[in-house]
Amino acid sequence: MRDILPGTVLHKLNFKGEKQEFLTTFCLSRFHTDRHFIEAREFLNNEEKNYYYSLRHERRIQSYLLGRYVAKVAGSFLANDSNLSNVMIERGVFTQPVVNHPQIRMNISISHCNQIGVAVACSEGFVMGLDIELITSSINSVLKSHLTNGEKNLLQKWSYRLDALPTLLWTCKESLSKALRTGLTSPFQIFEVDSLKVCGSSMILAEYKNFPQYRTISVLVDPYVLSFTYPKITEPPFEQIEEMMLDMKTTIQNKEPMT
């Protein structure tokens, strides 16, 4: 694809259903310099630019550009359309992203944290949600207070990456709420995680007490954790996800400015 900025990771992920495959496209980008934000602005269409120019706070401006850019790249890749401006992202009733494209109907989930933005696009017949968060001891301390009794029991039995687990559980719930298109407007306890399992080198599978039809894969790419939720009846592409993780690690942990 053209119009891809430096520091962008782009991957196809094929989820296998009983009778068909569901193609999803994942994008991660790290905006390391002001140039990234300036260039990302050029991909906005007229309506998005009107909203952009109404923003007043620098942090909100940057998160908007970062989120729209990764969503447009993921959506364009899914649609096989090199013109990022053809993917228009609107806001739904629960502030979820609603996508308009002239050729294909799709769903998109977006998340961002600091300089990192991520998005996943899929056909309208599939559903996914994702979330990315920074792992810090201070954030973990706060998030522990939101754990249910069942999740606290999981912590006591768990030995793998305890330093990341509270944040990981938070991202699981965030990604599930996005897949459900409710956001965190429901009581937080309803998203309770009731099982965890290590899979592969750095992946963790989570399942839910009240939503057994969904499963979440979390990947640890220090200092971040990324979680994405998908229908449990489909088989995720673990090898593709492992490859994606390697590219994510290179981009996230690169200390040099990406020009």
Image: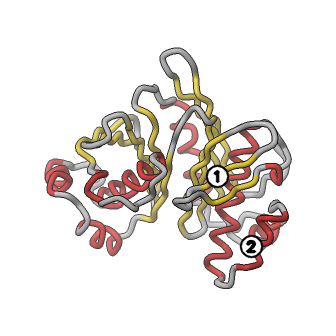
Q: Mark 2 or mark 1, which is nearer the start of the sequence?
A: 2
- In the rendered image, the quadrant that contains the N terminus is top right
SS class, disc 1 = strand
Q: Left or right of 239: which side holds 147?
A: left
- The circle on residue 98 is 1
Report whether 18 appears left or right of 159: right
The answer to whether residue 242 is left or right of residue 75 is: left
**Residue placed under numbered mark 2 in the picture:** 52
Q: Quadrant of residue 257?
A: bottom right
Up-down relation of residue 132 to residue 145 (above or below): above
Q: Amino acid at mark 2?
A: Tyr
Residue 147 sits in quarter: bottom left
The quarter of the rendered structure image containing the C terminus is: bottom right
- Of the pair 101 and 192, the residue shown nearer to us: 101
| Type of amino acid under label 1 | Val
Q: Position of residue 9 (x, y in %)?
A: 66, 49
Residue 214: percent from the left, percent from the top? 38, 37
Number of residue marks: 2
